[in-house]
Image (cartoon, rainbow, N blue to C red):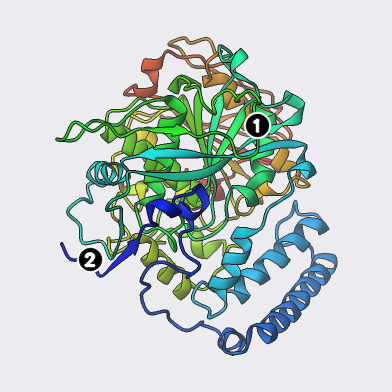
Amino acid sequence: MHNQHTTQSPSAAACTPRSAFRPSPSYPLIALPPAPPPSTMLGKLSHSLPLPMHLALASASTAASVSTAVLSHMLDGPVRSSWNLLTTLTHAAIKSVMVNHPPQGRHSLGIVRLATQFSVPAFMFDASVEQTSVLVRHPEQVSALVKEALDVAQQPLTNTVDYAGMHTRYVPGEWVRHKSLGPLPTDSVAASDEPVILYLHGGAHIFMSPRTHRVITSKISQACGASVFAADYRLALDGPFPSAIEDALACYLALTGLSLPTDDSGIACQASFRASQSRPSGAAPAIGHHRPVSPSRIFVMGDSSGGCLSLQLMQTLKSLNLPMPAGIAMLSPFLDHEIKSASFHNNWNSDFLSLDLDGIDWAMKIYANGLPRGHPAISPLNGKLWGLPPMLIQSGDSEVVTDDAVHFHRLATAAGNQVELQIYKDMFHVFHTFPFIPQSSDAMDRIGQFVRTFGPSAERDVDSAVSVDSSETSSDTDDAASVSTPSSSRTRATHTSHCKDTCRHAASSILRVSLVGGAITQEHIQAHQI
């Protein structure tokens, strides 16, 4: 197998948690394919200028776009009927930033780097945050096992990571816990059956971090009554595929205390939490930080590309015959890296995720790392979907990846999994990020209900029933589909379903789709093939 470029690993002396993860000031750390020029004349002009002039021009463009959107909202109405003025303003501002910074733009990677370094102050969301990291033993063997599990061990990857001589490495991350739940618990209450969340952030595989996603992780902690461990996994520009999956797997092993199968040399690959970087010296360690918990207490969650990584982790666990978590929740998951879905074009105006198409194609080639973008390891939508834990999928009906969620829901249900898809009317990509949008709070409530339904304290029963507090009626779209229509975005679906562990892999299950915030019309059914 010939590899064009090898990413050098840091030396043992430099193997601190942060330097092991960001080993060099050079950026990116991998060989990139030639970048196409921006598709618009403004983009070509702006990215040909020095950075200060580019930022000035981009700021002026954003100001003009926001002003135009606000005037249009006031005179002609919003892009989507339920949007208020603040939603319109937010959408217009983010959309303009996306348009002005196509992935292949000369200044875009540097700005992406800055965005990734940004930290949202935890106090803004009443959360306690504790920095820590996962110690990975025998990372070379971990990498080999992951590649074998994903069926890419013999594939000619463009970039690889050189783990030669490295016996350990670190994956940074942070624990997040909403203050309404009290402080991060200690080992003295390790017997608690409180759920634990492993969160994998989004960012198109190339930017963002746990620090940028504290809005979501703090709200999930509050809604689920759980501590959240957000993994700072390697991004595609730092660590080539499948580095992020290796890091996600290491975090799962550390949470559960599981180890990977031994290789021919008899070496067991393990991971564990190191001493916290922010807890005072001599203070008691926090539950889950150092004491493993059962997989039945763990939920894996992620937004956008983090939803994709969550599913990739499930496929890896399945291939390695490791126990699955209690469930997974995917928020606006980005699962089709071939970008073939109709919603990517139909919802171009209503979603802010409207990047340059040539730039997206270029970025996905970087992430695919020499593999076909339709390979099941890259686009898990095309993988073997049987034998997965209970799943919750939330998506807006106005985002470019709506069809990713809908298509996955159909395929996963046909494979015998227990899946619920909740489609939010008029919502754009990862609307959960914006707490001032009512649908965001409703989505968090439903995530919490999902965790309570399938978490360690839930009673199990073979039968499954769903009651919906709604004045609307339900209609069946086919023999396997029950479509409920809550009367408002604040209506909560109250799950009374309980099932035994075996029902997770049952050959038949209820295909359930909820359009939150309005009735499902024939237009929705036809547009998304619900």
Note whether 163 is above or below 442 in the view shown. below
| Helix, strand or loop status at disc 2 | loop
Q: Amino acid at mark 2?
A: Asn
Q: Nearer the viewer, residue 60 or 278?
A: 278
Residue at figure coordinates x 70%, y 30% from the top left: 222
Distance from the alpha carbon under mark 2 to that under mark 1: 45 Å
Q: How packed is label 1: few (under 14 Cα within 10 Å), some, or many (20 or more)? A: few
Residue at figure coordinates x 57%, y 78% from the top left: 107
Farthest residue to the front: give it: 13
Q: Nearer the viewer, residue 202 or 2?
A: 2
Note whether 342 is above or below 446 in the view shown. below
Q: Position of residue 71 (x, y in %)?
A: 83, 71
| Helix, strand or loop status at disc 1 | loop
Q: Amino acid at mark 1?
A: Ser
Q: Does residue 410 show up?
A: no
Which label number is shown at residue 3?
A: 2
Name the residue that disc number 1 marks.
281
Q: Position of residue 150 (x, y in %)?
A: 27, 45
**Which numbered mark, 2 or 1, is in the foreground of this view?**
1
* Horizontal side, residue 447 vs residue 1: left or right: right
Q: Quadrant of residue 505?
A: top left
For the image shown, how many numbered marks are present on the structure? 2
Q: Nearer the viewer, residue 31 or 446?
A: 31
Residue at figure coordinates x 52%, y 20% from the top left: 454
Note whether 71 is above or below 264 in the view shown. below
Which label number is shown at residue 245?
A: none
Residue at figure coordinates x 38%, y 46% from the top left: 245
Q: How packed is label 2: few (under 14 Cα within 10 Å), some, or many (20 or more)? A: few
Q: Position of residue 527 (x, y in %)?
A: 50, 53
